[in-house]
Image: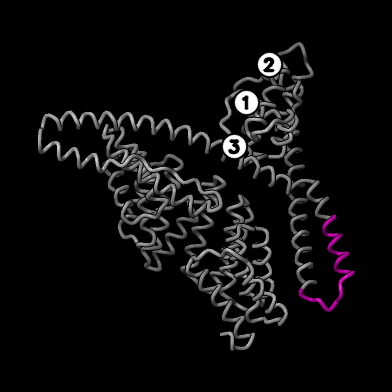
């Protein structure tokens, strides 16, 4: 290949990137794709440039740089001919929609998936339509619109049936079963699952069996749950096996089969370790395996053949040892889990901080400064260095997009705050605070109204709170009132607590979540930004 022309070498490199991507080999560097991309940009190659932009987006998605990935996917769309029907558009819409979905931008994801569906229709891509309808339904599920979710799942199912593709219909039915199970409609979930279990494509088998096992476990059909959990141990994904071993350990412990429970716990820990290697390669926490009972089992069998009475004593001794070991192991796991939960809470809180910063006025101000600096560089730059000019221009465009997003989010927050201030419960509480002679504290019914009002205005507020910490009722009430815009002294009156208690609660919550000392106002700013 080194002896070939530059155009052939670049096309070869693009094919290598494409082959790795199709084979699910994770991209770990952007150096190769950038050289290919810059070559096709310089050549203004309209044939290969859209694909180069697309795979640049795929690379940056693997590198977990969502804004850069989105930028390249959008450029890929721009470079494709608007009038030309090109299947690459479907892939691009799929990637953009999935990125929005992972970032919790459900409305944006819905818009993209619906564009993808329209393009599926233009290309008469019936199989693609099934997958797109499934993704639309899943997105509606994320925003708790069950009726819409069921509608699109049903449309996907009907189309799969029309195509006579049981693999597609079963996939959709399993998703419907999962949706019903989440909402506690177990009878409907079982009905949908029965169809999904009739004929399963191997690639869908792990997912469908996982749903079946979880459903039967939740509804008390332990024997059926055990059957599917054990089946998953043979062919399930590493995530399915992890859940299967954990659930089987729980079932066998309830049946007082401690030794079998420990075997499942051992296998569960191995799965956890494998998953950590896949998802947290930069911060592996290798787990020590449990004591290996196989030598003891062999020794037990030898003693049993020599003397039944001694074997019985040994057996009971091992059972006792297993129970004690399980107890200490459970205690160890509990402590370890608590530490992991604290670490997760801190990571989640820091992530929310970063996300909120990217929506702030300070972020907009800093971006505008950078944009001005880049514009100055462009004006002062030698016009012959087109590649560098293009890179700076791309940086500037990305900053402009981020700034626009932040400004949109600020506008949404202002509208939300206005809606809250205009709400009946807010006006009622404010009026009550002005009347020192009457009742000030909030009743149980009013807490429910206030909570539902916040849910309607800030749909993700309570979900974000539950992600970072398990608040008790009083702490949650304080957070709700902070989000509602009430001052510390007003919160003290509304909750019938001294102002000092409100102050110390806010300070302790900040310290507990962020593992560092902070002011009560720091906690207020964090809650207000959610």
Q: Which residue is mark 3?
A: 468
Furthest residue to the top?
437
Which quarter of the rendered picture does the N terminus lie within?
bottom right
Give the mark, 2 or 1, whose residue is nearer the N terminus.
1
The alpha-carbon separation of the residues under discs 2 and 1 comes to 12 Å
x%, y% of residue 254? 30, 32
Q: Is residue 201 visible?
A: yes
Instruction: Indicate which label's residue lies in the foreground, 3 or 1.
Output: 3
Q: Secondary structure at mark 2?
A: loop
Q: Residues within 10 Å of mark 1 (few under 14, many from 20)?
A: some
Q: Secondary structure at mark 1?
A: helix
x%, y% of residue 178? 43, 48
372 part of magenta stretch: yes
Q: Is residue 242 above or below residue 400?
A: above
Q: Secondary structure at mark 3?
A: helix
Read off the magenta span: 369-387
Q: Residues within 10 Å of mark 2 (few under 14, many from 20)?
A: some
Q: Which residue is mark 1?
A: 475
């Amino acid at each position: 290949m080194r002896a070939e022309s530059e155009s052939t070498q670049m096309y070869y490199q693009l094919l290598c990137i494409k082959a790795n991507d199709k084979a699910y080999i994770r991209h770990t560097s952007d150096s190769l794709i950038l050289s290919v991309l810059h070559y096709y940009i310089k050549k203004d190659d309209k044939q290969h440039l859209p694909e180069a932009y697309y795979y640049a987006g795929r690379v940056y998605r693997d590198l977990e740089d969502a804004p850069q990935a989105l930028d390249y996917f959008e450029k890929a769309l721009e470079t494709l001919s608007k009038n030309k029907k090109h299947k690459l558009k479907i892939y691009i819409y799929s990637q953009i929609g999935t990125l929005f979905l992972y970032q919790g931008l459900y409305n944006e994801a819905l818009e993209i998936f619906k564009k993808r569906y329209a393009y599926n229709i233009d290309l008469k891509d019936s199989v693609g339509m099934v997958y797109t309808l499934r993704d639309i339904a899943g997105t509606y599920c994320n925003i708790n619109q069950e009726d819409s979710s069921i509608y699109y799942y049903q449309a996907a199912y009907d189309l799969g049936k029309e195509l006579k593709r049981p693999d597609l219909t079963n996939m959709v039915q399993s998703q419907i079963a999962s949706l019903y199970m989440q909402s506690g409609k177990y009878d409907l979930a079982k009905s949908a699952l029965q169809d999904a279990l009739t004929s399963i494509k191997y690639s869908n088998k792990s997912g469908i069996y996982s749903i079946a096992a979880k459903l039967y476990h939740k509804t008390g059909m332990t024997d059926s749950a055990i059957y599917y959990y054990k089946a998953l141990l043979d062919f399930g994904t590493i995530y399915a096996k992890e859940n299967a071993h954990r659930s089987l350990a729980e079932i066998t412990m309830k049946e007082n089969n401690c030794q079998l429970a420990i075997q499942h716990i051992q296998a569960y820990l191995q799965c956890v370790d494998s998953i950590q290697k896949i998802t947290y390669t930069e911060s592996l926490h290798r787990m020590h395996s449990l004591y290996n009972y196989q030598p003891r089992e062999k020794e037990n069998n030898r003693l049993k053949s020599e003397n039944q009475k001694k074997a019985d004593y040994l057996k009971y001794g091992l059972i006792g040892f297993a129970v004690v070991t399980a107890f200490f192991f459970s205690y160890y796991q509990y402590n370890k889990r608590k530490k992991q939960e604290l670490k997760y809470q801190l990571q989640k809180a820091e992530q929310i901080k970063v996300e909120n910063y990217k929506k702030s006025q300070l972020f907009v101000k800093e971006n505008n400064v950078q944009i001005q600096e880049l514009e100055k560089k462009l004006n002062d730059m030698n016009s012959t260095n087109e590649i560098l000019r293009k890179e700076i221009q791309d940086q500037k465009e990305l900053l402009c997009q981020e700034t626009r997003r932040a400004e949109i989010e600020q506008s949404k927050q202002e509208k939300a705050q206005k809606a809250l201030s205009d709400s009946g419960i807010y006006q009622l509480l404010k009026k009550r605070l002005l009347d020192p002679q009457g009742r000030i504290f909030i009743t149980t019914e009013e807490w429910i109204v206030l909570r539902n009002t916040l849910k309607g205005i800030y749909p993700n507020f309570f979900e974000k709170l539950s992600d970072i910490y398990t608040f008790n009722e009083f702490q949650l009430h304080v957070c709700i009132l902070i989000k509602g815009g009430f001052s510390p002294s007003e919160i003290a009156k509304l909750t019938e607590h001294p102002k000092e208690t409100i102050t110390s609660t806010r300070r302790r919550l900040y310290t507990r979540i962020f593992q560092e000392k902070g002011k009560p106002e720091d906690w207020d700013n964090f809650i207000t930004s959610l």
